[in-house]
Amino acid sequence: MKNLQNTNLLPLMAALFLAVATISGAWFFELVLRLAPCPLCLTQRWPYYIGIPLLLVAMIMIKNGSRNAAMITVLAAGILFAGGAVLAVYHSGIEWRFWEGPAGCSGGQDLSASVGNLLQDLKTAQVVSCVDAAWRFLGISLAGYNVIISAIISALCFITLIQLRKSQGSSSISQ
């Protein structure tokens, strides 16, 4: 079981670094540059919130020689980030007006039923639409970059998974 010393952790470390840098970048755009995220932007963060701990746990499992558990964890992270890439494609398509977004992404907001609270809600309401990209670089929105980044992280997970399977095969041959 402990014969995982030959497993290259570089792809998994790169995936972890990229994931942490990406979610940090999202927070930077929101908190420092004051670009309020739309509902789909917030949903696209969930693969990072779940995936980063999974990547950390997988690295610990690999170092401790828990190959099978590490393989399941890396597979889960790879699928999670692939799903994040699909969600980002969906959001990018909405921004490019290839298809309609969900009703909750039109920029509307739930308002209070009472008149007193309604006036307060209108004063503090911040309308964020999923249709209009808040920022683009080289013609690509943040959702577009998330497609690329999530796909790369997913690929790095699957590369690690292949390496773990190869190390499993070589250790069973040497036994």
Image: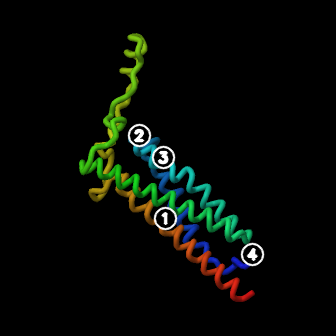
* Disc sitting over residue 27 in the figure: 3
Q: Residues within 10 Å of mark 1 (few under 14, many from 20)?
A: many
Kindly report which numbered mark, 4 or 2, lies closer to the viewer in this rendering.
4
Q: Which residue is mark 4?
A: 1
Q: Judging from the image, what secondary structure is the residue with disc 2 in?
A: helix
Q: Judging from the image, what secondary structure is the residue with disc 1 in?
A: helix
Q: Which residue is mark 2?
A: 39
Residue kind at label 2, given as amino acid type: Pro
Residue kind at label 3, given as amino acid type: Trp
Q: Residues within 10 Å of mark 3 (few under 14, many from 20)?
A: some
**Residue placed most toward the observer, 162 or 35:** 162
Q: CA distance from mark 2 to mark 1?
A: 23 Å
Kindly report which numbered mark, 1 or 3, lies closer to the viewer in this rendering.
1
If you read the primary sequence from the N terminus, does the residue marked by circle 2 or circle 1 appear first? 2
Q: Quadrant of residue 43?
A: top left
Image coordinates for residue 26, horizontal then vertical, percent: 45, 49
Judge left or right: residue 64 versus residue 93. Answer: right
Q: CA distance from mark 2 to mark 3?
A: 15 Å
Q: CA distance from mark 3 to mark 4?
A: 40 Å
The residue lying at 41 percent from left, 12 percent from top is 114
Q: CA distance from mark 1 to mark 4?
A: 26 Å
Q: CA distance from mark 4 to mark 2?
A: 44 Å
If you read the primary sequence from the N terminus, does the residue marked by circle 3 or circle 4 appear first? 4
Residue kind at label 1, given as amino acid type: Ser
